[in-house]
Amino acid sequence: MKKKQLAKLKKQFRPSFEGARKQLFDAMIEKAAALYQLNIRVFIDPKQPNDMMIELLDPTERDQQIKVPLDDNFKTVVKRIQNEEKGLLDRFSENLVEEIASYWSPDAARKQVSTPEKKATPAKAETTSAKVTDDKSTDAAAFATFSEKISAFPKFAVKETAQQIEVVEKTAKEERLLATISKTEENSFTIETALERKYKLKLDVIPVIEAFAKTPLANR
């Protein structure tokens, strides 16, 4: 069979855009259950065709549904899946599910991905001078890791005052406050409306802030 005929035949058997998108949705559902024990539904609401709806079918104290706008980058990836780019469906679906898990099941997400904080968790016993040195190293590492994670997002930065740690977004016109974390009270933080409005960052940034806020004050 000639190469042109083979290419044409392969093209005929490729999934449609909607078919490739369904493959992605199905892969997300499977990975959420297998990796994080999350029972989810992924679908397009006919009334909102430009949004991907992700619904948790298990009980939760957070929002039962997440709405993700389908931007041009998302559509480009689906087209690449449609063209059967090797390994892309598996990688992309796993990355999306990791973000979903960080929202609904942050503890499970942290178990799946090894982080510096896990390796640096100090023991509760012993108060030797060597232990004190280790703790100081851990404290610096915890804050440095948090700052590094936040700074990885475009225009985001971490600032410190005497009472709190601030997450800000630096724009050409202003410096916008996105969140604050208390330096005197454990698990005390605020999320500003400006951050809540960013749909993707709601999945990415807020879990990082929550995890650091829950870190014991002595270990920061």
Image (cartoon, rainbow, N blue to C red):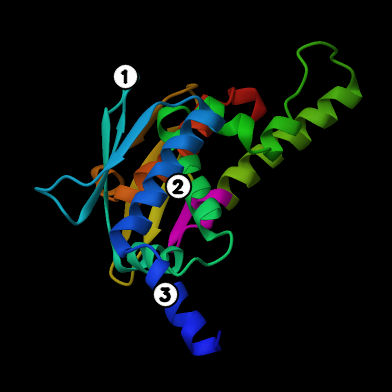
Which residue bears the numbered disc 1?
Answer: 61
- 41 lies left or right of 212: left
x and y percentages locating residue 216 in the rendered image: 59, 22
Dot in front, 1 or 2? 2
Q: Looking at the image, which residue sits at the far top?
A: 125
Q: Residue at the location (48% across, 55% down)?
A: 157
* Residue 162 seen anywhere in this rendered image of the structure: no
State yes or no: residue 157 in magenta.
yes
Q: Looking at the image, which residue sits at the far left?
A: 47
Dot in front, 3 or 2? 3
Give the residues in magenta: 149-159
Task: Measure the alpha-carbon separation of dots 3 and 2.
Answer: 27 Å
Within 10 angstroms of label 1, few (less than 14), some, or many (20 or more) residues? few
State yes or no: residue 186 in magenta.
no
Q: Nearer the viewer, residue 98 or 181?
A: 98
- State which tag comes first along the sequence, 1 or 2: 1
Q: Residue at the location (82% across, 30% down)?
A: 134
Within 10 angstroms of label 2, few (less than 14), some, or many (20 or more) residues? some
Indicate the quadrant where residue 108 lies: top right
Q: Examine the rendered structure and indicate whether residue 213 appears above or below residue 7.
A: above
Q: Dot 3 lies on which element?
A: helix
Q: Nearer the viewer, residue 163 or 11?
A: 11
Which residue bears the numbered disc 3?
Answer: 11
x and y percentages locating residue 160 in the rendered image: 50, 45
Which residue bears the numbered disc 2?
Answer: 96
Q: Are marks 1 and 2 in contact (CB under 8 Å)?
A: no
Tally the marks.
3
Q: Nearer the viewer, residue 207 or 45?
A: 45
- The amino acid type found where label 2 is placed reads Leu
- The amino acid type found where label 3 is placed reads Lys
Q: Dot 1 lies on which element?
A: loop
Q: Nearer the viewer, residue 132 or 84?
A: 84
